[in-house]
Image (cartoon, rainbow, N blue to C red):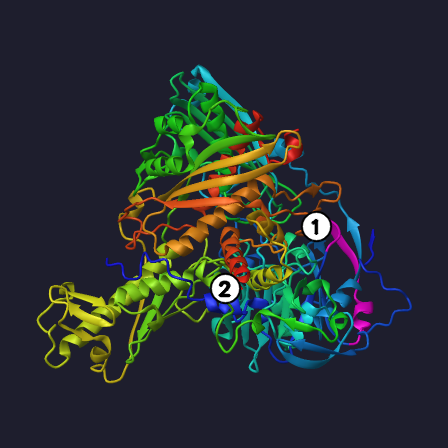
Amino acid sequence: MKTNEIGKPTNRVDGRHKVTGEAKYAGEFNVPNLAYGFAVNSAIAKGKIKKIDTSKALQVEGVLEVFTHENRPGYVWFDKNYKDMDAPPGSPFRPLYDNEVKFSMQPIALAVAETFELARYAASLVEVEYETSPHDTDFEANIERAYVPEEYNSGEPPKPWGQPDEALANAPVQIEEEYTHSSQHHNPMEMHASTVVYEADGKLTVYDKIQGVMNTHQYITHAFGMQPEEVQVISPFVGGAFGSGLRPQYQLFLAVLAARELKRSVRVTLTRQQMFSFGHRPKTMQRFALGASKEGKLEALQQDVFAETSRFEDYSEDVVIWAGVLYKCENVKLSHKLVDLDVYTPLDMRAPGGTTGTFALECSMDELAHKLGMDPIEFRLKNYSEKDQNEDKPFSSKELRECYRQGAEKFGWKKRNPAPRSMREGHNLIGWGMAHGAWEANQAQASAKAVLTSDGKLTVSSATADIGTGTYTVMTQIAAETLGLQLDDVTFKLGDSSLPDAPLEGGSKTVSTVGTAVKSACDKVRERLFELAQQVEGSPLAEASLEDVVFEGGQISLRKEPSKGVSITAAMSHNQGKAIEEEVSSKPADGQSDYARYAHSATFVEVKVDEDLGTIRVTRVVSAIAGGRIINPKTAKSQILGGVVWGIGVAMEEDTVMDNNLGRFMNHDLDKYHIPVNADVHEVEVIFVEEKDEIVNPLGAKGLGEIGIVSVAPAIANAVFHATGKRVRELPITLDKLL
Amino acid sequence: MKNKPEHENTETASLSSPPKETVTLHINGEAKQLEVEPWTSLLDLLRDHLNLTGTKKGCDHGQCGACTVLVDGKRINSCLTLAVMKDGTKITTIEGLAKDGELHPVQQAFIDHDAFQCGYCTPGQICSTIGLINEGKAKTLDDIRDLMSGNVCRCGAYTNIVKVVQEALERSQQR
C-alpha cells in the first residue's frame, strides 16, 4: 500500500472541536424542557430497605418525582433482559428492582427536578431505613474459599503442560512469592452521563457515555421492551473511559426510566463519588513459583490467581496467559480462582488481566534473574518464546528482540551497575529496571459504509467510538489513503446506533476491526470509481485494469504513466449525479486464528528514591513497542504515553481502600484516590520498532491502547528494587513500604 | 439503622429553591445580566444555564481542574465558585479564546503537540496554561509541571501539555 496518509503524524481531525469546547459529550446536550436526575446511593453494603421516605423531597417546589423500587414501573424484569454485550456470567444488577441492597453505594432512588441543584437537594432529603445484614468485603479473609467459576468470561486458564510440580521441585534455583494489588477505579475525567431526549412520538434519542453505542441500544431495547427503531443512541465524544464505558452504567437506566415515566427529557450525570459505585479493576493476589537451572533456563512456572468478584456475577480476566506468551517453559501450571464479596462486579480496566498478570510475572522473573546473577535482558533472551505455548501457535509477528535492543540503547542500559543500591546521586538512590509485556492484537467483525458524492467528497461511517484513542483520525487517514483523497475531503462518522454495526471499542481492536471494514468499503468504492473512470470519453484508463492504476491527489492515473489519468470528479460525472454507496461487513480472514497475534513492549525505567524520606520519582521511561504498522505516529505515541502514565498510577498511586467494617470504598474522590498528575510524570520516550505483519489484518496494524501500560508497573517495581534493595510485592509502592 | 441525609435539612429551612439574585457577568466579552440562585456554581451556570458546555465538570470539588476558567485573567476552579460571588467580573471560557475563527496560539499548540486525547480536560488545561502565563511564576520545567498539576489528565497527555506550556512561556518572554 502507498503511504500518502497512512504513517503520517497527522493532527487529530477532531482537534479543533476539542480545543474550542465545541465537542459535546453525553451530559452536554441541552434540549428544551430538560429535567435533571440525581441518584441516591445506599449507605449500607448489604441488607434490605425497610422504609424509603420521599415525602420531604416531593414537597420541594420544582421536584417532579422520586423513583424508588416502590414506585418503579413494571417493565421487563427478567434477568436476561439486563444482559449487556459485556456482561460476565451471572445475574446482572437491576437498578431499583427490589428492596435488596447488594453493595455499598448501590443506587436506590432517583430524584428528578427542574434544575440540577433542585434534584441534588431533593436527593439529600430522601430518608432511608435499612435492615442490615452482615456483609463481607474482606478479600484476604476469604481467599480460603476461592472457587473456580462455572464459566470464565475471559478465556479459561490453559491446561497444565509438562511436569510442573516435579520440575519445580528439581530446579536448583527457585522463587516463590505472592504479589497483590488492591481495587482500582477507572476515573475517566468525564463522569458517566446520559441525556435521554423524549421525542414527541415517545421515541428516545439517547446521548450516552459508552464505548459502543450498540451496547446501549441493545440494553435499552431489552430492559425496557422497546423496539429497535424506537431508540437511537448517539455518542460523538467520550471523555475517556478505559473500560468503564464498556457496560451501560446505572445512570442510563435511571434516565431512561424517568424520561419514559415523566414523558420528558431527562439527564442523569453521576458525581465523582458515584464513579466509585460501579465496576473496578478487581483486587488480585497471585502466587508465583518459578524454577530455573543454574544457567538461567526457566524449568518450571506455576501461577495461581485469586481475584475479587461480586456475589451476582463471575467476573474474570486473562491474568494467567502472559507467561505462556512471553517465556519458553516446558513445565507450566496455571489457575485462576474467584473470591465473591459484597461489592459491585469488577469491570475491564485498561489492559484487564494483562496489567495484573504482567506485574507479578515480570517482578518474579526479575527476582529470579537477580537470584541467578543474570542481567534481566540476558535472562529474558535466554528464555525467549518463539511460539505461544498456551495454544501452541506460532506468532503472526514478534519483534520483541528489537524492542529490547532499541529500548536498551536509548535508555543506556549497558551503563547499569547490576548491584542494588549501587547507583546514587546525592541523597537519591537511583534504580534502573525493565520489564516486557504483550497484549492481544485481535480483529472482530464490523461494518462500514462509504459514500462518495459527485463533488468528490467521501463520507465513511461505522457505529464505533472514539474514546480519545484517535478513531476519527485514523479512519479518515485509512479512507483517504485508499481513495487517494485529501484528508479534508473525507469525513468519518461514528457514535450513532443508526450507522453500520461495530463492536465495543475495547481490547485494542478498533483499528484492526473497524479500520479493515473502512478499507474494505473504500476498496469497493474504488472499483466502482475505476469503472466510471474508464467510461469517460477518451479515457486513458479504458484498457487498463485496477492493478494498473493509482489513486492519488484526487486522480486515478496509470501507474506507469502518472501524467495520464482521470480526476475523481470527472469519473463521478458519469454516475448520473448519483453518489457511490458501498456498505460492507468485514471479518477476520480464514487462517488468521492459526496464529497467536500480539503486540509487544519493553519498558525501561529510572527511579530516584530519597534515601531518608523514601519518596520515589519516576524520572525517565523508555517504552519500545512492536505494534505492527503505525497508522498515525502522533496519536499512536499518545496512546503509549497514556499507557506509561497509567503504569505509573498502577505502580505508585492507585489504591481504592476498602473499609471492611462498613463494606465501603473509603477514598471515593480524586482527592483521596490518587492518579498521576503532571508533576508525577517526567521524561517519557516512545519507540516504535518496525514490524511487518500480514496476518493480523489487511492493514498490518496492531492496537495500541493497552500495550503501553502492561510492562510499566513491573519495570518501576524492579527499578525500585534496584535502587533500594527492597522488593515491594504489594502495589502501590508508597514510601511507607520503603522505610 | 436510620440514614440521615448528608446535608441535614433544618426545620426552619423552606423546601424550595432559594430566591434569585441579579448579577452582571461579562462572559467572553459580552455583558450578561442574569437572575441566579445563590446555590448555583459558576460552573453549573455556564454549562446548564448558558449552554457554554466547553467548561467541564470532572469532580465538582476542586480536585481535577477540568472546570478552570479565567476570571479577570486569573485561573480559578469554577466549580468551587458560586456564580453570585463573581458579580461584575470578566469571565473568559474556552469558547471565548478564538478570535474571528482563528484559534488562540495555545489552542493551536494543543492540537499540534497532540496534548490531549479524549479532550475532556482540555478546555481546563488551556485556560490553566493561559492563567499560568499571566501569573508569571513558572520559570523552569519543574515549575511548569508543578503549576499545571491542578489539572488532571487521565489520558496521560502530560508530557505533550508541558511542551505547549513551555512554548507559550517562551512566546510570552519574547513579547
- Residue under numbered circle 2: A218
Q: In the rendering, at what x and y percent does residue B9 appear?
A: 85, 64
Magenta residue span:
A42-61
- Name the residue tied to disc 1: A104
On the image, the x and y values in percent for residue A558 come to: 13, 67
Q: Position of residue A226 (x, y in %)?
A: 53, 71
Q: Residue furthest bottom?
A: A576
Q: Is residue A387 above or below residue A61?
A: above
Determine the secondary structure under disc 1: loop
Circles 2, 1 touching at the beta carbon (< 8 Å): no
Q: Is residue A48 magenta?
A: yes
Q: Amino acid at mark 2?
A: Gln
Extreme residue toward the front, this view: B175
- Between the C-alphas of marks 2 and 1, the distance is 27 Å
Using the image, determine if residue A206 lies above or below residue A435. below
Bin the neighbour count of mark 1 within 10 Å (Cα to Cα): few under 14, some 14-19, many 20 and up. Answer: many
